[in-house]
Amino acid sequence: KAVANPSGKVLLVEDNPLNQKVLGMFISKLGYEYDVASNGQMAVDMCKSTFYPFVLMDIYMPGMDGTEATEKIRENEINSDLRAKIIAITANESEESVKRCYDSGMDDYLVKPFTLETLKEKLV
């Protein structure tokens, strides 16, 4: 069931075009609008100009990875009252990987492949 009036947009940070499509479909099905950033630097820049209440952040990307991008987004939020909920998207559920996500300032994580239902639970 779609969300009645989701506030704001989701920023999907994902370098793989196929994953962008699949995850984009999930986000739309949940009733959210979304923008796509295809790398970490782009995500940081987009978060500077637009407040996204939710950021789905792929961890492994060429150039600036998800944890580094998250650290930069958090730095930019310091003087703001707004704080995005940043959710890692990772295929690696190891303790070390999860710890890196939280250490960088992420709020939660999703392990690929995940279901629409799981994503819905995170976007609250």
Image: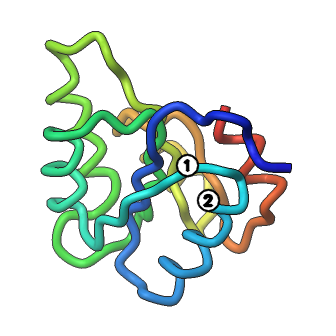
Q: Reply above or below: 92 against 102.
A: below
Residue 87 x %, y %: 52, 46
In three-dimensional space, the C-alpha distance between marks 1 and 2, rounded to whole angstroms, equals 23 Å
Query: Circle 1 is placed at which residue position?
Result: 98
Q: Which residue is rendered at x = 62% and y = 61% of the image?
A: 28
Identify which residue, 116 or 112, lies in the foreground: 116
Q: Along the polypeptide, which appears first: circle 1 or circle 2?
A: 2
Query: Circle 2 is placed at which residue position?
Result: 27
Q: Which residue is rendered at x = 47% and y = 48% of the image?
A: 10
Q: Quadrant of residue 115?
A: bottom right
Residue 107 x %, y %: 52, 33
- Label annotation for residue 7: none
In the rendered image, the quadrant that contains the C terminus is top right
Q: Find out whether the residues at labels 1 and 2 contact each other: C-beta distance under 8 Å.
A: no
Q: How many marks?
A: 2
Describe residue 70's horizontal placement relative to residue 113 as left or right. Answer: left
Q: Which residue is rendered at x = 67% and y = 66% of the image?
A: 26
Question: How many C-alpha atoms fall within 10 Å of the one at disc 2: few (<14), some, or many (≥20)?
Answer: many
Describe residue 3's horizontal placement relative to residue 51 as left or right. Answer: right
Describe residue 111's horizontal placement relative to residue 69 as left or right. Answer: right
Circle 2: residue type: Ile
Q: Which residue is rendered at x = 32% and y = 74% of the image?
A: 61
Residue 42 x %, y %: 18, 61
